[in-house]
Structure formats: structure tokens, C-alpha cells
Amino acid sequence: QVQLVESGGGVVQLGGSLELSCAASGNIFSPNGMGWYRQAPGQQRELVAAITSDGTTNYGDSVKGRATISRDNAKNTVYLQMVSLKPEDTAVYYCLYSDWPANKYDYWGQGTQVTVSS
């Protein structure tokens, strides 16, 4: 089992920035992939950003140019920074941890609410 502890989120001003972090512990895979997905009410869960343990990144189209994902492999922690927040960024953000590249196992965090307020 892998445990994920998410932090960050909350209410953010329109045009502002946010930082989320997610720390993994337990049965750590090597190599692995970590990332963030989000789900707004009535919408499907979508990719925000992902990063593999070798540093390869992938971003969702809706956040390209506004999001930066990074990780600290020694701490098994992934970070997401987003700027120029828009109302449509309001969603529950979920951390994902997987046994990339096999992608046979994946673990999800409980989610953290991000609300962009004007």
C-alpha cells in the first residue's frame, strides 16, 4: 500500500497562484510516476500535470503555460504550482501515484478543494 498526504489548496483569488504538494509513503515503487488530476462538479476527472521519476513531465492542455510540476525523489513528494488562476480552475485536485512505466497499480489521494474566487 501507498499512502498519499496532500497539502495546499483552499480559496485563491482570481489571477492568483497556488501550490499543492503530495507526499507518498509506504510501498514506494521505483521507478514511479506522480501527478495531479482535478474534477469539477459535473465534469470528468482530467489531467493537470504529471511527472515521472526520471523527470519527464506532461501537462493538460487547459493549464499549459500556467502550471509547473516538480518533484523531490528523496522525499517522494510532488509539487504543483499554478499561476494566473481562472474560475474554471475551481475543482477538487487529486494526487496520483503509480508504478510507472508499468502502470499496473495506482493510488489516489483524498483530494483537496481549490476554489478560485473573484
Image (tube, rainbow, N blue to C red):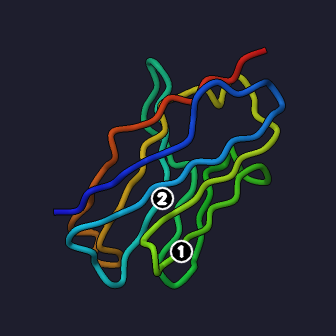
| Residue for point 26% across, 60% down | 106
Identify which residue, 93 or 62, lies in the foreground: 93
- The spot of residue 19 in percent (x, y) is 65, 47
- The spot of residue 8 in percent (x, y) is 56, 41
Label 2 amino acid? Answer: Gly
Q: Disc 1 designates what residue?
A: 72
Quadrant where the image shows the C terminus: top right
Of all residues, the one furthest to the left in this rendering is: 1
Q: Residues within 10 Å of mark 1 (few under 14, many from 20)?
A: few
| Residue for point 42% across, 50% down | 95
| Residue for point 46% across, 35% down | 112
Of all residues, the one furthest to the top in this rendering is: 118
Q: Residues within 10 Å of mark 2 (few under 14, many from 20)?
A: many
| Secondary structure beneath label 2 | strand
Place residue 22 in its image quadrant: bottom left
Label 1 amino acid? Answer: Asp
The correct choice, above or below, for 95 with respect to 9 in the image is below
Q: Disc 2 designates what residue?
A: 35
- The spot of residue 20 in percent (x, y) is 57, 48
The correct choice, above or below, for 86 with respect to 96 in the image is above
* Badge nearest the viewer, 2 or 1: 1
Specify whether 83 is left or right of 55.
right
